[in-house]
Amino acid sequence: MEHYRINDYSVTFDPIKHQYWVDEKPIISVTQLIDEFYPKPYKNVDPEILKKAAERGNALHDMIEYFERFGRKTYHVEMHSYLALKTQHQFDVLDNEKIVLIQHHGVVIAAGRFDMVIQSPFMQGLGIADVKRMAHLDEKRLTLQLNLYKLGYEQTYKQRIDYLKCIHIRNRYHNYIDIPVDTTLVKSILDRYVEKHPIDFTAYY
C-alpha cells in the first residue's frame, strides 16, 4: 500500500489492485471512470499478449521516470526515442507521477496518477504529458483521460494547465501529439457518472 497526504485528504493506493481510498472511502480510478463510458478496445485480445504489452509499457515509464528524477540514462531504443522528442520539442519535466483527486459537486469521486508536468519555451504556461506505448492510440479515451487529469491537477494543486500532450513511443517510432482541451466533455462525463452513481452526501455530514 502507498499512503499520501494530499491537501486535507488521506489517500491510500493499492498498486496491485489499482484501488484508491480517500479518507478511507473507496474511490474509482480515472481508468475505471473512462472504462464505464469508453470500453477498452482490446478486451478480446489474448491476456498473455496484454500482460507482455503492459510489462513493456511499465519498463518504458520506469526508464523515463528514472532519467527525469535521477538523471539515469538507460541505453535502450525507446529511451533514445524519448530523448529525441525532448531535444526536438525542448520540454522540461517539472514533476513526475502526480496523484490527482477529481471533485464533482464538492465531493472527491475519482483519483488518478499521470506521468509528468511539463514546460516548454514553445508553449505558454504548464502542460500535462502522458506516455503511451500502444500500437494504436484510442483518441476518445486519451482525450478524456488527459482532460480528467487536467481538471484533477487544477483542483488538487491550484495551478492552471494550459495544454495537453501525448508522448507516443514504440520502438523507434516517436511522436509528440497535441490533445485538445475539452472542459465540456469532462463535465458531461462527470454529470453522467453521478447520475448513474448518486453521491451519498449524508456520508460527509
Image (cartoon, rainbow, N blue to C red):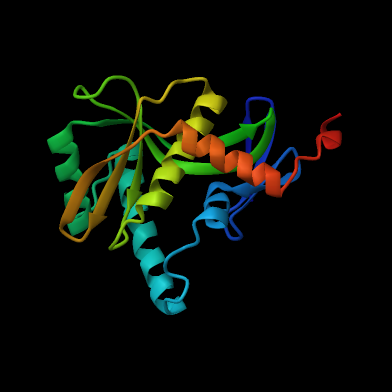
- Pick the front one: 66 or 117: 117
Give percent across and percent down for residue 37. Answer: 54, 54
Query: Could you tell me residue 79's position as x and y percent?
Result: 22, 51
Above or below residue 129? Residue 33 is below
Q: Residue at horizontal 49%, vertical 56%?
A: 38
Q: Where is residue 7 drawn, in percent x and y? A: 63, 25
Quarter of the rendering containing residue 77: bottom left
Q: Measured along the vertical axis of the image, is residue 15 above or below residue 126?
A: below
Q: Residue visible at 32% across and 20% down?
A: 125
Q: Residue 183: in sight, yes or no?
A: yes
* Residue nearest the viewer, comparing 144 with 22: 144
**x then y, percent, for residue 19:** 63, 53
Residue drawn at (28%, 63%), measured in percent from left and top? 135
- Choose between 172 and 127: the one closer to the eye: 127
Residue 120 vs residue 154: left or right?
Answer: left
Residue 98 visible in this rendered orientation of the protein: no
